[in-house]
Amino acid sequence: MSVSEIQQQFPAFEKELVQDIESNSEIRSFTAGEQLMRTGQYFKSTMLIVEGLVKVYREDDQGNEFFMYYLQPGQACALSMVCAVKQETSQIMAKAVKDTEVISIPLSYMDEWMSKYKSWYHFVLETYRSRFEELLETIDHIAFQAMDERLEFYLKKHVQTLGSKTIPLSHQEIADELNSSREVISRLLKKMEQMGKVKLQRNSIEVIKLN
Amino acid sequence: MSVSEIQQQFPAFEKELVQDIESNSEIRSFTAGEQLMRTGQYFKSTMLIVEGLVKVYREDDQGNEFFMYYLQPGQACALSMVCAVKQETSQIMAKAVKDTEVISIPLSYMDEWMSKYKSWYHFVLETYRSRFEELLETIDHIAFQAMDERLEFYLKKHVQTLGSKTIPLSHQEIADELNSSREVISRLLKKMEQMGKVKLQRNSIEVIKLN
DNA sequence: GTACTAATGTGACAAAAGTCATAGACCAGT
DNA sequence: ACTGGTCTATGACTTTTGTCACATTAGTAC
């Protein structure tokens, strides 16, 4: 990973910080589908996404999972910061959706840079802030909305994030992420198709228009 | 508010910080039942709880509410930090449960102290961290658990926080906070009573034993 | 093509939660 | 003790979601 590549994804970072990152961090690559972290793991470092796309989701004891949010280049996993500080295990899973490159920064530097670099300080706070908001939004949806609305929102989010109208997921995968069952999702999708909101294909959904 | 009172609730703060707080912050008092913040409000300051008890909950467009967590003396509202930084409105309501005193710290100092006082820095990060975890826990409950389990957890939490086995809430109030309906809560409580877990009185619930 | 597998469609049913209607219980003020 | 208001209890019913069983379809491998 070169200085210029880092600088490109994190334009707000001052030059010295970028150099510090370059010399003190490790690049890790994950192929699509690979897990970046899993429940019960300890963190000794925090991760910045340089390239690719990462899906972060929650998992309970029975193996039910639950989609929380995507991480894109230029973002960091607040969870790895949260847990890193306390040396605690997480209840979080993260999976690479596309081939992904991350910068892995040891905990000790993360802390040191907070006072050393203003841009790092703002970056960390902004990461907490934005993830906090995502979680609040997630809570809103599961607390207040019915499955059909949640499904629509889920699809909308995917279109935004993937930058494509075609979502390459099976009904089963969607059901898992919304912690529902395939039949329910199939039925709702069928309804949406009849309303002209989506077009269903095998293993993918083409979004026509959502409110 | 005297230096010693602040120091008592926030023992980790160094002396200079406490003095800085004393001379640059404002004390605000709320009587039980009063709102500390409401949806749509802007923040120009962050609040530390010195005395009392504050309930933080989420509200949607239709006025449904949803309990998130309690704030106790020695804690701060992460939301007010989150929003303060970005000068954004919150979707959060906070209400004093007991008579409450808070220290209101202007945004500018909050930022300045981050680099000036190590203990402040840790306090802010720890606040983010712990609230983040509370939110994750909340998500777990609404995503993975049925109403009966959520109710039990809710009661347990209240016993812990209030430090009393008697919870002074009506079924309707509980229903609101769990975003359910009174009848449902009444029925579940009745079942719990038959199982010997609680004893029901008018306007209050006495907890006998929960797992 | 045939055979196999994964994905999807669908009807029937069960369970959980929400809604409606109504009645009783409790408390406060007079 | 009467009255009005709030809180609680309960049965009947609806809606939503989850589950089960099985049929159909689409893609893949041979």
Image: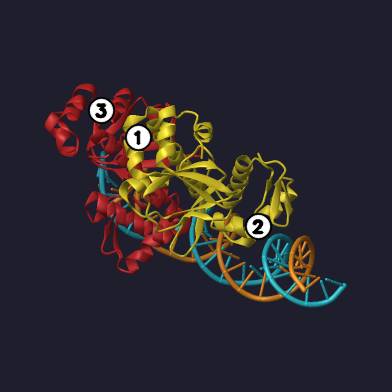
Chain colours: A yellow, B red, C cyan, D orange
Task: Name the secondary structure under disc 1.
Answer: helix
For disc 3, the neighbor class at 10 Å (few under 14, some 14 to 19, many from 20) is: some
Image mark for residue B116: 3
- Return the mark for residue A4: none
Structural crowding at the residue carrying mark 1, measured as other residues with C-alpha within 10 Å and reported as few (<14), some (14–19) or many (≥20): some
What amino acid is labelled 1 in the image? Trp
Q: Position of residue B103 (x, y in %)?
A: 24, 30
Q: Secondary structure at mark 2?
A: loop
Label 2 marks which chain's residue? A
Q: Which residue is mark 2?
A: A170
Q: Quadrant of residue B195?
A: bottom left
Residue type highlighted by circle 3: Lys
User: Is any atom of residue B201 visible in this view?
Assistant: yes
Query: Disc 2 vs disc 1: which is toward the camera?
Result: 1
| Residue at 50% across, 47% down | A144
- Does residue B66 show up? no
For marks 2 and 1, the one nearer the N-term is 1
Q: Which residue is mark 1?
A: A113
In the displayed structure, B86 sits above or below B63; it is above
Whole-number angstrom distance, CA of label 1 to CA of label 3: 14 Å
Q: State the CA–CA distance, disc 2 to disc 1.
A: 43 Å
Residue B172, given in percent of the width and then of the height, sits at 39, 50
SS for tag 3? helix
Q: Nearer the viewer, residue A138 or A10?
A: A10
Mark nearest the camera among 1 and 3 is 1
Position of residue B191 relative to residue A35, above or below, is below
> What is the x, y in percent for residue A27?
48, 45
